[in-house]
Amino acid sequence: MIVEAKHAVPTATPAKTAWQRGRLLALASVVAAVLLLAHEYVPNRWGNLGSLVQTFLPWLGLAVPLGILAALLRRSALAILAVLLPLAAWIWVFLPQVRPVEAAPGDLTVVQHNASDANTDVAGTAKVLLAAEPDVVTLAEVSGDRAEEYTQAFGEALPHHETQGNVGIWSKYPLKGAKAVDIRPEGSDAPWDRALRVVIQRDDVGVAMFVAHLPTVWLGRGGFQTESRNSSALRLAEVVNAEKSDAVIVVGDLNAVLADDAIAPLANLVTAPTTGFEFTFPAVFPVVQIDHVLARGATVTEVRALGKTGSDHLPVVAHIDTSSS
């Protein structure tokens, strides 16, 4: 008697439905939404992760178009629905910045620019800056002969000037009380000459101005390296806080976005416009605004980026209402 062996017929695995596919994509959308809404709770203990997230926070909005594309490729209804979370979070956080608002006029126009020590096109750079019809121009990464070249290029339009180390100010109004400001990072033994305080004298009204260039940050093996910048920002905040003038303007390359809680000691002392994304670095494809014009006892009514120069930064022009002091 021959018994035929019975082979088990494999059962087909049911295909996943559109609501079962794309769970990882949906999770990624949830994470992006959480980071947008709770970025201030991201700790800095792991390579300054919190500062890194806050520096590039607006770009988390890319989770929406990328999430939609991935969801369509995956044919996942779950992932498409989940994309609504970062979309809603981004709108909640940044709607005030993208909502069109007519800027109030100001009585002082300030142009700020990290001109770059590698930028040899002084005449071309000066032309871009002067086209904004500034009352004051502040520059970083200019010193010695290069500062003299800018003085000649600005000419009679900005006849008053002061420099300190690698920062300087050129003004149509007289400048008084120029002095260096010590913002050397804690523990640094290197020469540090990157901040200046002057008083812009208009009639009988003086406006104190601080021009500063904070230390560079970078991504390395240890994460987002911001310690020197944070220390320098704290020292600048102490000086600004001690300033007795009614109206104070703080300008410069701060190497930080204002959303970064690491520079909150300084950012909390001043105000800036809350509309628009005026990214300034890198000039070839700007992704962050690290060049700022801020004020205390005055109102910065508008800040916008200017066109390219020979620098790796874009300049910014700000209109300031000093009558609110």
Image (spheres, rainbow, N blue to C red):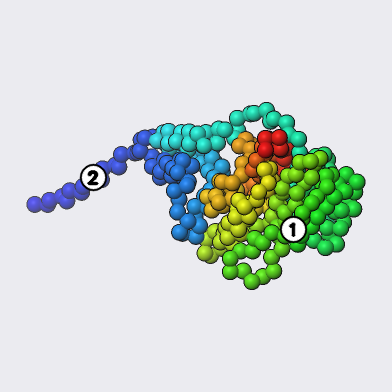
Residue 287: image location, x then y, percent: 63, 47
Question: Dot 1 surroundings within 10 Å: few (below 14), some, or many (20 or more)?
Answer: some
Query: Is residue 208 in view from this perspective?
Result: yes
Q: Is residue 217 above or below residue 175?
A: below
Q: Is residue 157 left or right of residue 86?
A: right
SS assignment at label 2: loop
Residue 194: image location, x then y, percent: 71, 60
Q: Is residue 173 above or below residue 77?
A: below
Residue assigned mark 1: 179
Q: Which mark is residue 116?
A: none
What residue is rendered at 68% in x and 43% in y? Answer: 247
What residue is rendered at 52% in x and 61% in y? Answer: 223
Q: Is residue 163 left or right of residue 43?
A: right
Query: Is residue 72 in view from this perspective?
Result: no
Residue furthest toward the left?
A: 1
**Quadrant of image for the C terminus:** top right
- Give the mark nearer the N terminus: 2 vs 1: 2
Question: Dot 2 surroundings within 10 Å: few (below 14), some, or many (20 or more)?
Answer: few
The part of the image, by quadrant, that contains residue 164 is bottom right
Q: Which dot, 2 or 1, sits closer to the camera?
A: 1
Q: Which mark is residue 9?
A: 2
What residue is rendered at 87% in x and 53% in y? Answer: 151
Amino acid of disc 2: Val
Q: Is residue 185 left or right of residue 19?
A: right
Q: Is residue 81 left or right of residue 110?
A: left
How many labels, in total? 2
Amino acid of disc 1: Lys
Q: Nearer the viewer, residue 243 or 311?
A: 243
SS assignment at label 1: strand
